[in-house]
Image (spheres, rainbow, N blue to C red):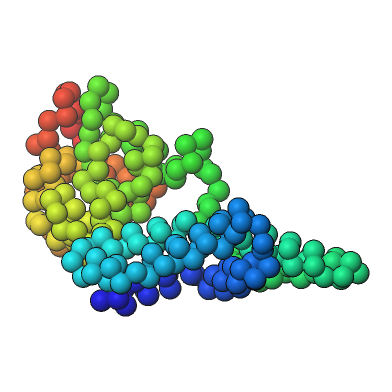
Amino acid sequence: MYSQVIDNIQRYMGTGGYLILFAAAVLYLFFREKEKRLRVVFVWLPVVVFAVFFCPVWGLYFKFRDDGEILFRLLWLLPVALVVPYAMVRLIGEIPDKFKAAGTVVSFAVLILFGKYMYTPDLFPKAENIYHVPETVVKICDEIKVEGREVRACFPEEFVVTVRQYSPYIHLTFGREIYKGSLERGVDAMYILRKDPIDTEELVKVLKETDTPYLIVKNDRVFDENPWKYDFCFVTEIDGYDIYLDNNAYLGLDYINYR
């Protein structure tokens, strides 16, 4: 059961480089830093956090609870961004003056080599609009919105977070809970949408149970039966995503019949 605790820290470490630097910095400051106030932050705080993190009680917590992944948040208390640079500055300050410039360059090189470039297009895509969400999300939300009321829609998994960022009037059939592996009411639709082909009858059942009139899917997805059979009519296509509407849904206004 304690293996999950180890797995937690391994995932937090990433490449592991900065954690090694951090451990070396704490060890160095343990012997070199004499000021008590600084030792509290740079030495004793990391020691206490690691002691709590590796406490055997967490093993029991993992065994009886299903939210043990939150344990990694304890590691956010580690002052890595303070300890590592401070230790480097202290170390450079102790070497002869003629080597200080070289020591500074080496320190920067170590930080770069041990780290990982984060500003990739996957993690930080170029903003498409002032809302900083995909333009496709804006177009779809504007297409299905109904003035004066809220609308529930089943979006593809890739848009779950950004829909919530753009519009408070579009309610999702499933939200962030999908990442917890839950099969509670309203979350089932996501698991059905992951099937290939999509089980139309099963999906429509969930949509009707959750009062979801709108279904949005990528237009290359295949249904085992035509949604029309279950009164989900094709409305339009936006940027490669098809929008379907429950023909029996009441949206609070007179809706034009779509082709």
Image quadrant where one finds the C terminus = top left
How many numbered callouts? 0
Which residue is nearer to you in this view: 78 or 182? 78
Residue 209 visible in the picture: yes
**Considering only vertical position in the picture, is 117 above or below 185?**
below
Q: Position of residue 55 (x, y in %)?
A: 34, 69
Q: Is residue 159 left or right of residue 253?
A: right
Residue 225 occupies quadrant: bottom left
Residue 119 visible in the picture: no
Residue at 36%, 47% (x, y): give it: 161
Which residue is nearer to you in this view: 243 or 44? 44
**Considering only vertical position in the picture, is 207 above or below 53?**
above
Residue at 33%, 59% (x, y): give it: 70
Q: Is residue 49 left or right of residue 222?
A: right
Residue at 85%, 65% (x, y): give it: 101
Q: Is residue 246 left or right of residue 162?
A: left
Which residue is nearer to you in this view: 232 or 184? 184
